[in-house]
Image (cartoon, rainbow, N blue to C red):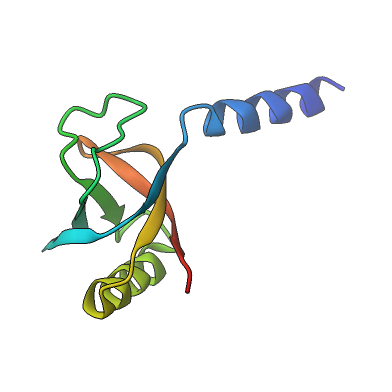
Amino acid sequence: MKKYILVALSCISATAFSAEVPKSDITHINPWTPFVDVQMNTPTIDPENCGNSNTYRVDLVDDAGGQAKLSVLLAAFMAGKQVGLVINGCVKGRPKIEAVRLSK
């Protein structure tokens, strides 16, 4: 029973600070090794006070889905499509992109 409570609490705490960035335009993509910074045309959301929060960051090293997120972001940027983001955690002082939403 204690294990189930511990797992439930860790799941809750992992998502406690996640935030949704509404669908908006990507205004800037800046690749850095091993990260990619993304700026949107809406005010930046920084639920965990990461520090430098004028852009969001994709982690290409420790995030198994980092390359897929980057692919969607680049496709949307080139096509002029809006994307929504889910932000959760920090990567080297910037809010981490946990998920990217692209719709027609």
> Nearest the camera: 21 or 47?
21
When the figure is inspected, residue 30 is found, relative to residue 1, above or below; the finding is: below
Q: Say how many tags the image has.
A: 0
- Measured from the top left, where is residue 17 in percent x and y? 46, 28
Q: Quadrant of residue 6?
A: top right
- Tell me if 31 is positioned left or right of 89 in this view: left
Image quarter in which the N terminus is found = top right
Q: Quadrant of residue 79?
A: bottom left
> Nearest the camera: 75 or 70?
75
Q: Quadrant of residue 21?
A: top left
- Measured from the top left, where is residue 77 in percent x and y? 24, 71
- Measured from the top left, where is residue 81 in percent x and y? 32, 71
When the figure is inspected, residue 19 is found, relative to residue 17, above or below; the finding is: below
- Say which residue appears at 31% left-offset and 58% top-offset: 61
Q: Going by the picture, which residue comes out furthest to the right?
A: 1
- Measured from the top left, where is residue 28 in percent x and y? 13, 60
- Say which residue appears at 63% left-offset and 33% top-offset: 11
Residue 33 seen in render? no
- Say which residue appears at 78% left-offset and 26% top-offset: 3
Residue 66 seen in render? yes
When the figure is inspected, residue 60 is found, relative to residue 71, above or below; the finding is: above
- Tell me if 19 is positioned left or right of 16 in this view: left
- Say which residue appears at 15% left-offset and 33% top-offset: 52
- Tell me if 5 is positioned left or right of 93 in this view: right
When the figure is inspected, residue 53 is found, relative to residue 6, above or below; the finding is: below
